[in-house]
Amino acid sequence: MAELKGALIGCGFFAINQMHAWQDVNGARIVAICDRDPERLRLVGDRFGIERRYADAATMFADGGFDFVDIATTVASHRALVDMAASHRIPAICQKPFAKTLSDAKAMVSGCAQAGVPLMVHENFRWQTPIQAVKTVLQSGAIGEPFWGRFSFRSGFDVFSGQPYLAEGERFIIEDLGIHTLDIARFILGDVASLTARTKRINPKIKGEDVATILLDHENGATSIVDVSYASKLSKEPFPETLIELDGTKGSIRLSQGYRLEVNGPDGVAVSDASPQLLPWASRPWHNIQESVLSIQQHWADRLAGGGETSTSGADNLKTLALVEAAYQSAASGRPIDIGAMLR
C-alpha cells in the first residue's frame, strides 16, 4: 500500500503532539499544514520540515495532493472544516469536542456519510494503555458481568497556563475533560440510557464549571459514576491519570494512581503495571496522553488503508457528545435526561 498523505489544520498547543505522532505512524505522513497565525505556521513548519504551508483552508483543499485531513482547531471551526472536507471527498479526523451542538455533529456525520468518506473524532483517551488494559481484563471475563463502575479524574493541575482560553468559556470541565471520561465510561461499560449531573465552579477566576459529578445508567443495567475536577488539592498530584473502579459478579478491577492495575477474581488477586510507554518525544506527566495520540492516529491510518469503521467514528462520537449535552441539561434542570431521546 502507498503511504497516505495527510494535511493538518491548526498548529496550536495540542497539534504539536499530533505532528510528533504522525512522524511515528506507519503508513502515513503529513505533507501540508494550515493555520491563520503565520508565526505558528512557521514554527510548526520549520520544526517538522513541512514545506506546504497555508493560511487558508479553502486554498489548501483546492490545491489537493493529500489523502486525509487532521482538523486540530478549536470547536467553533469544526463544522465548516468537516463540511469542506466532505465537499472535496477527503476523509477527516476532527479534534474533540466534535461540534458546538449535537445538531451540528449529526449534520457533519450525515454529510461525510453522503460523501462516502470516513470521519473520525480524535477521542484519544480510550486509547491510553491503562484504559485498554482495563478493557482487556473485563473482556476476559475475569470479574464476570460488571454492574458498577467509577471513572474519576480529580486534579489541581493548572491547565490554564498552557490553554488560557479554557478559562474564558461558559462551559469548561465537562466539555473539555468530562467528554473524555464519559467516552471511557461508554467504552468500558457500554452505551448509556439516562444521565443525571451536578456541577460546581470553585475557581473564581474562570467562567465555567470546574467540578462535575455524573451518574450514568447504562443500557446493560450497570450503573457508573463519572467524576471530574480541576479543583482537587491532593497530596500527590495524579494528573493526567483516569482512575477506574469496576465491580462485577465474580470480582473487581481497580486502576489506581501510578498505573497500578489490581484484579480480584475467583483465582485470587493479580497486580500489574499498566504504565504507558514514554515515547522519545514525550514528557512526563503528559506521556500517557501523548502515547494515546500515536495509538489513535495509527488506528486511523490502518483503517483508512484497510477499510472498516474506526473505534471513535463520527457516528460513535455522537453518543459521547450526547452525554456532554445531557450533563449540562441535567445540571441546569436538576433532572435526569433520556439519552435515547437526544439521539433520535
Image (spheres, rainbow, N blue to C red):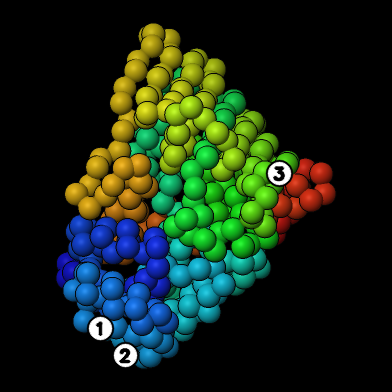
Mark nearer the N terminus (1 vs 3):
1
Q: Quadrant of the C terminus?
A: bottom right
Residue 176 seen? yes
Q: Residues within 10 Å of mark 2 (few under 14, many from 20)?
A: few
Identified at 31% across, 22% down, the residue is: 272
- Residue 63: which disc? 2
Mark nearer the N terminus (1 vs 2):
1
Relative to residue 56, is residue 232 depicted above or below? above
Observer-nearest of 170 and 231: 231
Relative to residue 292, is residue 217 depicted above or below? above
- Residue 200: which disc? 3
Relative to residue 54, is residue 315 depicted above or below? above
- Residue 77 in the image: state x and y as whole percent: 53, 75
- Residue 64 in the image: state x and y as whole percent: 31, 86
Observer-nearest of 55 and 316: 55
- Quadrant in which residue 229 is drawn: top right
Identified at 50% across, 68% down, the residue is: 74
Mark nearer the N terminus (3 vs 2):
2
- Disc 1 element: strand
**Is residue 280 shown left or right of residue 105?**
left
Q: Are marks 1 and 2 in contact (CB under 8 Å)?
A: yes
**Is residue 298 shown left or right of residue 146?**
left
To which residue does mark 1 refer? 52
Observer-nearest of 198 and 264: 198
